[in-house]
Image: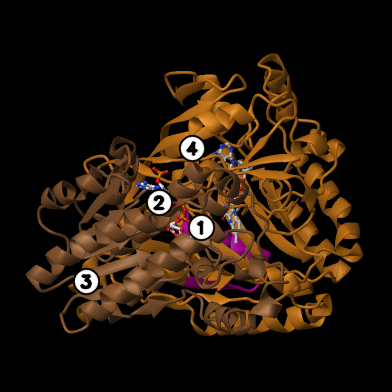
């Protein structure tokens, strides 16, 4: 069968295994060809795709919860959506969440995902106490900060290349309502946006939506949005009695592939301008339910079909604080000049780097979607070059096309990781299309 | 407290989805299967996610002599009983080996019919209850590719129909579920049309709604009602030449 990531590019022919227990999983490691674990396939490119791919969907049970510490133990295939369903009504929420709730614990650990609170609280690893990892020999070992600490560290951001995560213990966050108190700050250009970031460093959540087609004085025109979990006394009186009741979102299915031409620079420009104006009008404070705040895109199932059968890609880089502003400006200029349509552009402030191969570094991260076509592909080397020149790196969970050379120049940490993998015999058992492309 | 639900054949993928659906609505569960100890991980998961009580009990549908004692031991007697027990068997083996064929008859017809019959007696005596039998569209017309399984399901469907007819004037409801293709352990590795393939969650939702609405017969996906109407309507001289 053909497998791909969320961006539907590249598509790789291979076998998808769906083992139901540890023994069946271990048996798959006996074969000659290496395997890669797959969660919900929300990584954009080929991280969870290989000739032999192992779906973790049957490993989907919760195992234990300690209401004193908020520690949840669950199998790797359990999704954040499932955790929210079960625990939000009891006053708990994932401590770190990406922009979609349809990710598994295994995927969240393997990519060491970040949320809108990286600057204030760190990545997924900061809230993971331990996990059980099946190694190359099929044996399972428990990894934590105290036991097998090196393997523990290398697995965050290790993209499934250190073994198969079976179960993990993560700490949830106590919340008092299902609502977020949001403050919207319109910024006319990049300088204003970065200033707003500086001024809101103590906000729990912070993210900016950039209209990356703005040019000249409008370059980096954005809406900066901060958020805090609301206390019941901050809710309107009629909501205080049931602070965890939020409107249930009806899933809107996206039933067919849009022909590629629907998304062109003109429609996207119009959309962006409209979004900005709507946002600017709403500037100020507001209450938003958790689902709309964290997961606006989840409301449309399979929205990745919007880009048609050829699929799309995401460019996401992290740039260091120092010189990051110039780097961002040059990236935005290059994107505006190219006229390649970018539908979504998100800018976040990152806190310090943790872990040997975890993506975030102290500075900024910019993420943009592009339809898969020649124009976009032609733009990528230019964006890569700007990233390299400003000491930045690219996010493997979003990558589908970077070259080995670009990886070497942006993120030399991987050579040590590759050596470790070889010494431990992990490279013969675990490999993805991405790891083969990048020589990891 | 919400009404307790008994799930027979609880390790089945459809049964597991049903367990989650009913637990989500707050129903306490009794999970029954062969080697019940292996259900404990599921039970823990259900308790954690939904905060309901979940008990696991041993049950073998082919041990008909033990059915009475099994039902006696249920305390309380459940309000809803769902039977997901079934086994496809291997058609070629069933053709060759009468022992294999008999096992398919027992797992799909004899066992499920007898245990639901036993529960029907108790529900009738109590004056309430819902019985849900998962049969199959395969029982609507015997096909060369799986007629041993199909015949057993046909028997089960007829049994449920008769039971419903008998209990029509009592408050006890009997619901027949006729799923089409469902992605489960039973169909793993089979090449089935993706557009017709339902997920276990979808079947569970349909069963939950059917219990709420006291429906008699559901097809899970309405399209199957149409497909089966066409297949049933084919004259035999045409049907016997088809390869479905
Ligand atoms: C709309 C959208 C928004 C997003 N927003 C963000 C964001 O804000 N921040 C962010 O950090 N990311 C974001 N992402 C990316 C996403 O969070 C990551 O790609 C995540 O890893 C996906 O999890 P998954 O379960 O789908 O894993 P998959 O995509 O299936 O796999 C991702 C990687 O994890 C590995 N993996 C999965 N399960 C296991 C396991 N059990 N054991 C070992 N390795 C495993 C795979 O091998 C692969 O390398 C977003 C993605 C989408 C589609
Ligand atoms: N999947 C489909 O496409 C489809 C379509 C139409 C109808 N159905 C019906 O749906 C029901 C559920 O099946 P499924 O698809 O979820 O497949 P499944 O996972 O294979 O479930 C079948 C279950 O029946 C149990 N079982 C078999 N013989 C038994 C016995 N003698 N005593 C107790 N339990 C027994 C099995 O228990 P063990 O785990 O102990 O083996 C298994 O858990 C079945 O009745 C099936 O015929 C399925």
Q: CA distance from mark 1 to mark 2?
A: 9 Å
* Residue at the spot of label 3: A242
**Circle 1/circle 2 CB separation < 8 Å:** no
Q: Can you give x and y, in whole percent of width and height, for residue A236 in the image?
A: 25, 79
Q: CA distance from mark 3 to mark 4?
A: 32 Å
Does any atom of ligand 2 lie closer than 8 Å to the CB of label 2? yes
Classed neighbour count for the residue bearing mark 4: other residues with Cα under 10 Å, few (<14), some (14–19), many (≥20): many
3 vs 1, front mark: 1
Is residue A179 left or right of A392 when viewed as pictured? Answer: left
Q: Can you give x and y, in whole percent of width and height, for residue A436 in the image?
A: 80, 35
Q: CA distance from mark 3 to mark 1?
A: 50 Å
Chain in orange in the render: A
Helix, strand or loop status at disc 1: helix
Image vertical order of residue B217 relative to residue A290, above or below: below
The image shows a total of numbered marks equal to: 4
Q: CA distance from mark 4 to mark 2?
A: 48 Å
Chain in brown in the render: B
Image vertical order of residue B81 relative to residue A323, above or below: below
* Residue at the spot of label 2: B107
Is residue A242 left or right of A38 when viewed as pictured? Answer: left
- Location of residue A128 by image quarter: top left
Dot placed on the residue nearer the N-terminal end, 3 or 4? 4
Q: Can you give x and y, in whole percent of width and height, for residue B55 in the image?
A: 21, 47
Residue A200: say if magenta. yes
Same chain for the residues under marks 1 and 2 in the image = yes
Disc 4: host chain:
A
Query: Which residue is pictured at 51% across the width and 48% down the height?
Result: A104
Q: Quadrant of the C terminus of chain A?
A: top right
* Residue at the spot of label 4: A125
Same chain for the residues under marks 4 and 2 in the image = no
Disc 2: host chain:
B
């Amino acid at each position: 069968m053909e497998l791909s990531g969320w961006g539907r590019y590249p598509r790789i022919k291979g076998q998808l295994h769906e083992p139901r227990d540890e023994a069946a999983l271990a048996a798959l490691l006996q074969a000659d060809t290496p395997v890669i674990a797959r969660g919900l396939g929300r990584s954009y490119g080929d991280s969870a795709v290989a000739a032999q791919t192992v779906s973790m969907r049957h490993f989907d049970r919760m195992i234990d919860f300690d209401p004193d510490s908020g520690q949840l133990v669950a199998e790797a295939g359990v999704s954040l959506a499932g955790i929210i369903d079960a625990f939000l009504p009891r006053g708990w929420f994932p401590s770190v969440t990406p922009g979609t709730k349809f990710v598994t614990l295994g995927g969240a650990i393997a990519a060491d995902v970040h949320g809108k609170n990286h600057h204030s609280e760190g990545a997924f690893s900061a809230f993971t106490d331990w996990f059980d990892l099946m190694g190359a020999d099929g044996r399972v070992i428990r990894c934590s900060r105290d036991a097998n600490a090196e393997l523990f560290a290398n697995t965050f951001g290790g993209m499934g290349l250190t073994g198969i995560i079976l179960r993990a213990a993560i700490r949830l966050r106590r919340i008092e309502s299902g609502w977020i108190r949001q403050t919207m700050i319109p910024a006319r250009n990049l300088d204003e946006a970065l200033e707003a970031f500086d001024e809101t460093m103590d906000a729990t959540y912070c993210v900016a939506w950039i209209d990356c087609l703005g040019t000249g004085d409008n370059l980096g025109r954005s809406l900066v949005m901060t958020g805090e979990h609301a206390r019941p006394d901050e809710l309107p009186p009629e909501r205080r009695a049931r602070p965890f009741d939020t409107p249930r979102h009806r899933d809107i299915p996206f039933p067919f592939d849009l022909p590629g031409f629907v998304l062109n620079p003109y429609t996207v420009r119009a959309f962006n301008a409209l979004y900005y104006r709507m946002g600017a009008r709403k500037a100020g404070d507001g209450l938003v339910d958790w689902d709309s705040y964290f997961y606006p895109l989840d409301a449309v199932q399979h929205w990745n079909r919007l880009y048609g059968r050829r699929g799309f890609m995401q460019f996401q880089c992290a740039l260091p604080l120092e010189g990051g502003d110039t780097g961002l400006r040059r990236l935005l200029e290059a994107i505006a000049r190219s006229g390649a349509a970018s539908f979504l552009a998100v800018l976040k402030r990152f806190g310090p780097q943790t872990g040997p191969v975890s993506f975030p570094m102290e500075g900024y991260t910019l993420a943009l979607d592009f339809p898969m076509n020649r124009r976009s592909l032609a733009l990528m080397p230019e964006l890569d070059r700007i990233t390299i020149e400003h000491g930045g790196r690219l996010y493997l969970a979003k990558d589908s096309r970077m070259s080995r050379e670009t990886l070497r120049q942006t993120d030399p940490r991987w050579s040590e990781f590759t050596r470790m993998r070889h010494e431990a015999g992990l490279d013969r058992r675990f490999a993805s299309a991405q790891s083969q492309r990048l020589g990891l | 407290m919400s009404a307790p639900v008994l799930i027979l054949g609880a390790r089945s993928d459809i049964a597991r989805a049903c367990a989650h659906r009913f637990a989500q609505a707050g129903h306490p569960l009794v999970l029954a299967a062969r080697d019940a100890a292996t259900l404990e991980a599921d039970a823990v998961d259900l308790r954690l996610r939904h905060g309901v009580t979940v008990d696991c009990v041993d049950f073998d549908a082919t041990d008909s002599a033990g059915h009475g004692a099994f039902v006696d031991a249920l305390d309380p007697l459940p309000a809803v009983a769902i039977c997901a027990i079934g086994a496809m068997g291997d058609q070629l083996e069933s053709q060759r080996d009468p022992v294999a064929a008999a096992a398919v008859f027992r797992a799909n017809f004899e066992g499920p019919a007898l245990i639901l019959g036993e529960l029907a007696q108790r529900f009738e005596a109590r004056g309430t209850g819902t019985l849900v039998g998962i049969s199959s569209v395969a029982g609507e017309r015997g096909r060369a590719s799986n007629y041993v399984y199909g015949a057993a399901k046909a028997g089960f469907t007829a049994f449920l129909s008769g039971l419903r007819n008998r209990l029509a004037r009592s408050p006890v409801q009997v619901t027949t579920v006729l799923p089409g293709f469902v992605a489960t352990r039973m169909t793993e590795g089979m090449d089935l049309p993706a557009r017709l393939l339902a997920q276990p969650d979808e079947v569970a939702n349909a069963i939950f709604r059917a219990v709420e609405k006291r429906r008699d017969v559901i097809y899970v996906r309405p399209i199957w009602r149409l497909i089966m109407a066409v297949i049933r309507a084919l004259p035999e001289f045409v049907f016997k030449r088809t390869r479905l």
